[in-house]
Image: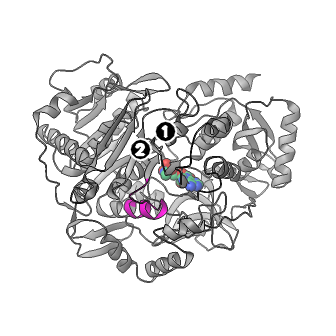
Amino acid sequence: MSSVTSNIESTLHEDRVFAPPETFSRGAHIRSAEEYERLRAEASESPDNFWARMAEELHWFKKWDTVLKWDAPHAEWFGGGKINVSDNCLDRHLETWRRNKAALIWEGEPGEQRTFTYLQLHTEVCRFANVLKRFGVQTGDRVALYMPLIPELAMAMLACARIGATHSIIFGGFSADSLRDRINDAGCKLVVTADGGWRRGAEVKLKPTVDEAVKETPSVRTCIVVRRTGTRVHIEAGRDHWWHEVIETVDAHCPAEELDSEHPLYILYTSGTTGKPKGILHTTAGYLLQAHLTTKWVFDLKDEDTYWCTADIGWVTGHSYVVYGPLSNGATVVMYEGAPNYPEPDRFWRIIERHRVSVFYTAPTAIRAFIKWGEQWPLKHDLTSLRLLGTVGEPINPEAWMWYREIIGKGRCPIVDTWWQTETGAMMIAPLPGATPTKPGSATKPLPGIEADVMTRSGAPVGPNEGGYLVIKRPWPSMLRTIWGDDERYRATYWSEIDGVYFAGDGARRDADGYFWIMGRVDDVINVSGHRLGTMEVESALVSHAAVAEAAVVARPDEIKGSAIIAFVTLEGDRKATDGLKEELRRHVAKEIGALARPEEIRFSDQLPKTRSGKIMRRLLREIATSGGVQGDVTTLEDFSVLEKLRVHEEE
Ligand code: 7RM
C-alpha cells in the first residue's frame, strides 16, 4: 500500500435525488429523516445507552453487565450476558403465531421446491445439533461446512450455533488445497458436505474435493455427507456418514446452550492484499444484534414480506442476510441454489413472480449481467410484488442503478445500496428506505451508531467532495474481533494504517449533503500525473456509454504519468469491437471526467475475470496489462477460461 498523504480525487458527478415514496414511508419502521437523525444523535451522544436499548430486541438468557469494554483494538460487547443465536432465530418464534410460518422456501436449480416452517426448521436443527454432539463436537470446537446452497447448510449453521460450535463455511467452489488450508488454519474437527450441487445445469462435485483435502487435515475425524445430486461417492468407513442416516439415530430434543456474549460464532476466510486468507472472527451477541437491526431497518422487513437475498451462504452476505438477520426477524426467506441464467436468463424473475418476492437483494455484477442479457427477460414476468430493492458487493454505477430502478422496480421501489464488509459483519452505510432520499451510486449515510468518516492517510479530516480513506471511528457491536490465530495481522491491517481508527481499505468521498460515495478499494486507486482517480469512476464513465456492458480499469506503470489507465471492456451483445469504437470510448471518458482520465488503452473482452462472489479481479487484469501474463494466486477465480481468452487477446 502506498504511503501517500494527498487525497484521492473524485470526479463522479451525479445530481439525481429520489425521495422515499410517501406510501412507503408511512408504513416503514423508520419513517422520516428526522427520526433517523434522532436515532443517530442518540447513538452518538450516548452510545452505550443506545446499544443497550437496541439489545432489548434480542432474547437473552441473562442480560449483560457492561455494554462495551474497549481495550483498543479489542472489544468486548455485552459482557456478562448469556444468549444463543439459534434460540433467537428459531425458538423465540415458536412461542408466537410464526410457529407455522414459512421460514425457508428453497428452490433447487433443477426446479424442485422445499419449504420449512419455523417449527419444522427448529426440529431439523435440533436433530442435527444432536448429531454433532454424537460425533463428539463440543462447545468451542470448529466445524467446517463445504456445501451447496441447500437447506441443510442453514440447518448446519444453526445447529453449530445452538451448541456453541464455531462454524467455518468454505464456499463450494474452492479447490481442495484452499479447503485443506482453511480447515487446518481453524483446526476443524468435523466437515459437513454434500455429494454435489447444481450449477448451470451441471453437477458441481463436492465430496471428491473433501476426500482430497482431508488427506492432509489431521484435526478432522468425521465427515457428514448430504445426498443432494445422487452421484456415486466414496464413503470412508469410520469417518464418513450420510446425513439422512445419522439424523435417524437422534431425537429432536436439544435445548440451546446459554453462551457468553463473546462466544465465537463463526470464522469466515476473506482474501487480503497478500497470499494467506484471513480468518475473520465474529462472536455471538454483538454480531446478532446488528445483523438483526440492519435487516429490520434497511430492508424495512415486515411479517408479510417474502425476502430474497441471492448471495451464496458461503459469503458474508449469506451469513448475515440469508440466515441470521432475516431468521432472527422471523422473516420468510427464499433460497435458490443455482445460476441466474439457468435454464434461461429469466430464472430470477421467474422466482420473484412464483413466490411473490417483495424484498430483493443482489449484487451490481448481477445487475450488469441482466442489463447485458436484455430487458426482455424481466419484462416477461410480473414483478409487481416487489417493494424494495437492494445491492451490495461493489460500487454500483449510476447507469446500473437507474436500470434496476426502472426495469425491475418500475420506478416504484426504493433502492438500498448497502456498504459493508466481511469484517464489519453487518451493513454500515446504507439508506433507510422510508427516511433517506437516495442518489444513484451513493450508499448514502452511516446507520445509527456507526461513526464513519473520510480521512487523509495521515488521519486528517477532508472537506466535502474531497476523496480520502473510509474509516470507522468507534467500535461497533458486529465488528470482527480478530483474525483467527493472527492477532498481530488484525492490528496491522485494520488498526495501524491510520492512528486510532478502523481502516476499511476503501476510498470514499462525502458530498455536501454528507452522503458517502465509495470509490472502490484503495489498492484500486490510480495515480495519473499526480491525480488520484478511483477506478470505479472511470468504469462508471465507460458504462454510461451505450455500447458498454461492463468495464474494469487498472493502472499500468508509466514513466511519464506515473500510471496509465488500461480499460478492459465488455460490449453490449449487439455491438462490434472496432478501433473506431475504442477511440470513441476514450473520447467519452475524457468528456465525462476530463482528459487526465482518458484510458491509454482499451481492450475488448467477452468476459472479465471475477471471483466466485462476483468481484472483478483487477489484480489479474493489472498483471495482464503490465506483463501480459498472470503469476499470482488465482484460486478464487470463477472461470479460468476467461484468463486464457485475455491472454490470447494479448497476442493478437
Ligand atoms: C458485503 C461484502 C467488502 C468490500 C468493501 C468494498 C466493496 C461492498 C459495497 C462496496 C461500494 C457498496 N463484503 N463493497 N459493498 N463498495 N458500495 N455498497 O461485499 O468483504 O466481500 O467485500 O466490497 O470495497 O470493502 S466483502
Q: Residue furthest top?
A: 232
Q: Which residues are magenta?
A: 291-305
Mark 2 neighbour class, 10 Å CA radius: few under 14, some 14 to 19, many 20 or more: many
Residue type for callout 2? Val
Residue in view at x 26 percent, y 28 percent? 225
Q: Residue furthest bottom?
A: 45
Q: In screen coordinates, is 525 left or right of 631? A: right
Location of residue 646 with respect to 135 vertically, above or below: above
Is 299 inside the magenta-drawn segment? Answer: yes
Q: In screen coordinates, is 570 left or right of 418? A: right
Residue in view at x 43 percent, y 50 percent? 306
**Picture coordinates of residue 19, whole percent (x, y):** 64, 67
In-front residue for pair 382/319: 382
Location of residue 54 with respect to 425 vertically, above or below: below
Residue in view at x 27 percent, y 32 percent? 217
User: Which corner quadrant of the image does residue 260 belong to?
Assistant: bottom left
Location of residue 509 with respect to 425 vertically, above or below: below
Indicate which disc, 2 or 1, sits on the residue closer to the N terminus.
2
Residue type for callout 1? Ile
Location of residue 525 with respect to 147 vertically, above or below: below
Q: Which residue is mark 2?
A: 334
Tell me the distance, in whole angstroms, between the alpha carbons under discs 2 and 1: 9 Å
Mark 1 neighbour class, 10 Å CA radius: few under 14, some 14 to 19, many 20 or more: some
Residue in view at x 23 percent, y 76 percent? 65
Pointer 2 with pointer 1, Cβ within 8 A:
yes
- Residue 91 makes an appearance in the image: yes
Mark carried by residue 256: none
User: Which corner quadrant of the image does residue 210 belong to?
Assistant: top left
Q: Which residue is mark 1?
A: 351
**Picture coordinates of residue 312, whole percent (x, y):** 44, 41
Q: Secondary structure at mark 2?
A: strand
Is 595 inside the magenta-drawn segment? Answer: no
